[in-house]
Amino acid sequence: MAGRKAGGERKKAVSRSVKAGLTFPVGRIGRYLKHGRYAKRVGFGAPVFLAAVLEYLAAEVLELAGNAATDNKRKSIMPRHLLLAIRNDDELGKLLAGVTIAHGGVLPNIHSVLLPKRAAEKAAAADDEKESQWPKKKKTVAKKPAAAAEDAADGDADAGAAAEE
């Protein structure tokens, strides 16, 4: 056997996804990068890094969507929950600002002018509290005693009579 080693057990192949500790397929992403003509050459670490980023984003979106589904008392994630999760998160909303989610609907938003009086006052108060960091001081109005109010009314009547003379 010239040039060959004696037969023995071969080591089992380990994928790059397992080596990197990822769930997303590093080999498939690398193949897509090469055949997609994004660049003439693709480095060895590029598909690993891209797979890690995609896995993180997917986990983040699914966690928030799962919370939205739980809040709506549902056990499965629907497109509506994905939309609520993405639009209510500042960073994800900015990243996916131009994305339309099919059957996602819109965020619930009622203008304060259209709300009934009491609800509008509560909404305006809530908006004011969010805008200011310091709590507002309550204004106290001193009420006049009943006797002082009657004296003031009598005094005005006397002043009017004196002005006529």
Image (cartoon, rainbow, N blue to C red):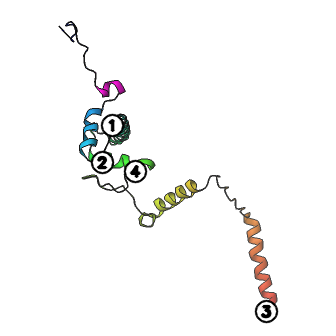
User: Is residue 24 one of those drawn in magenta?
Assistant: no
The Cα atoms of the two marked residues, 2 and 1, are separated by 12 Å
| Residue 102 spot, x, y in % from top left | 25, 53
Q: Which residue is drawn at 26% across and 44% down?
A: 78
Q: Which residue is drawn at 36% across and 27% down?
A: 20
Look at discs 3 and 1 and give the one toward the viewer: 1
Chief secondary structure of the magenta portion: helix
- Contact between marks 1 and 4 (CB within 8 A): the answer is no
Look at discs 2 and 4 and give the one toward the viewer: 2
Residue 164 badge? 3
Q: Count numbered badges in the picture.
A: 4
Name the residue carrying label 1.
Answer: 47
Ranked by sequence position, the earlier of labels 2 and 3 is: 2
Ranked by sequence position, the earlier of labels 2 and 1 is: 2
- Contact between marks 3 and 1 (CB within 8 A): the answer is no
**Which quadrant is home to the C terminus?**
bottom right
Query: In the displayed structure, does residue 113 sit left or right of residue 138?
Result: left
Look at discs 2 and 1 and give the one toward the viewer: 2
Q: Nearer the viewer, residue 136 or 99?
A: 99
- Contact between marks 2 and 1 (CB within 8 A): the answer is no
Name the residue carrying label 4.
Answer: 95
Q: Is residue 26 above or below residue 153?
A: above
| Residue 35 spot, x, y in % from top left | 23, 43
Q: Which of 79 and 41 is in front in this view?
A: 41
Name the residue carrying label 2.
Answer: 38
Residue range (magenta): 14-21
Identity, as a three-letter code, of the amino acid under mark 1:
Pro
